[in-house]
């Protein structure tokens, strides 16, 4: 559980809060996510960070917030553009450095070329590294799903063959069964007819004088 600090906010804490919150705004994230990240970094609760931002820090960064929202719209627009993405992103990075660390904070030229650039590029490095990790995870998941799909297709083909074979065997057995029933039925009828014929036959025997007499 994150420890709650009771001491006053320092200028460095306010700067961290402002930088992370502006980054989340610029990247299209939520302020709540920004406050949680700040809280983990400086050892405060997200609620305390949100209260500090809304009550004290935000008013000093109104222009920076407007710029960050504009940069978010630029990024949203660039994502929809199919061509010349690299040049657009490069121009956007340079513009972001100048806008965020030049005008909003009133930094001089030497500070812009060193501190602001380094700080900004570190943020971008972290963003791209995270995007790269997520892309690798998505590619790995995609390969796993493709392997599963291949296995399922092979299993489906095998089961289809087994079903077709079973249906063929059933038809053969069913035909043989019908033929056997017909043979048994004919044999039963034939036996019944033979019995009737034997009963209907007239029987004779010869007497002592050599004459035939009918046996009733």
Image (cartoon, grey):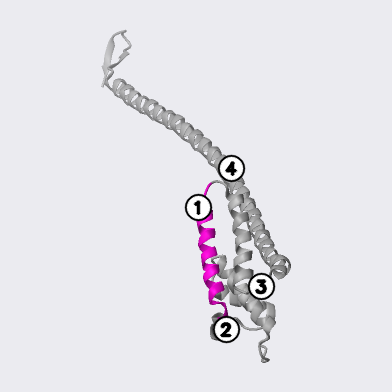
According to the picture, the residue beneath numbered tag 3 turns out to be 107
Mark 1 burial class by Cα count in 10 Å: few <14, some 14-19, many 20+: few
Can you tell which mark lies on residue 47? 2
Residue drawn 52% across the image and 71% down it: 66
Can you tell which mark lies on residue 80? 1
Element on which disc 2 rests: helix
> Mark 1 to mark 3: distance in Å?
33 Å
Element on which disc 1 rests: loop
First to last magenta residue range: 60-82
Q: Considering only order in the chain, which callout, 1 or 4, is on the residue closer to the N terminus?
A: 1
- Quadrant of the frame with the C terminus: top left
Q: Considering only order in the chain, which callout, 3 or 1, is on the residue closer to the N terminus?
A: 1
Query: Mark 4 and 2 residues: CB-CB less than 8 Å, in contact?
Result: no
Q: Nearer the viewer, mark 1 or mark 3?
A: 3
Query: Mark 2 and 1 residues: CB-CB less than 8 Å, in contact?
Result: no
Q: Quadrant of residue 92?
A: bottom right
Mark 2 burial class by Cα count in 10 Å: few <14, some 14-19, many 20+: few
Indicate the position of residue 212 as horizontal and vertical percent values.
Answer: 28, 11
Residue drawn 59% across the image and 67% down it: 99
Q: Considering only order in the chain, which callout, 4 or 3, is on the residue closer to the N terminus?
A: 3
Element on which disc 3 rests: loop
Residue drawn 55% across the image and 46% down it: 83
Q: Quadrant of residue 197?
A: top left
Can you tell which mark lies on residue 150? 4
> Mark 2 to mark 1: distance in Å?
35 Å
């Amino acid at each position: 559980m994150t420890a709650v600090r009771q001491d006053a906010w320092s200028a460095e804490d306010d700067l961290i809060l402002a930088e992370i919150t502006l980054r989340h705004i610029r990247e299209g994230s939520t302020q709540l996510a920004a406050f949680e990240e700040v809280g983990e970094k400086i050892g405060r609760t997200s609620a305390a960070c949100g209260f500090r931002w809304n009550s004290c820090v935000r008013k000093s960064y109104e222009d920076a917030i407007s710029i960050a929202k504009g940069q978010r719209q630029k990024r949203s627009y660039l994502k929809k553009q199919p061509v010349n993405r690299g040049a657009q992103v490069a121009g956007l990075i340079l513009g972001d450095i100048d806008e965020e660390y030049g005008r909003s904070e009133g930094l001089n030229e030497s500070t812009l070329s060193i501190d602001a650039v380094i700080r900004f590029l570190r943020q971008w490095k972290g963003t791209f590294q995270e995007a790269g990790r997520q892309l690798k995870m998505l590619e790995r998941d995609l390969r796993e799903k493709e392997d599963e799909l291949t296995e399922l297709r092979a299993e489906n083909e095998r089961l289809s063959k087994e079903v077709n074979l079973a249906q063929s065997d059933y038809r053969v057995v069913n035909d043989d069964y019908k033929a056997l029933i017909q043979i048994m039925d004919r044999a039963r009828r034939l036996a019944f007819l033979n019995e009737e014929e034997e009963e209907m036959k007239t029987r004779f025997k010869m007497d002592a004088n050599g004459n035939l007499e009918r046996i009733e």
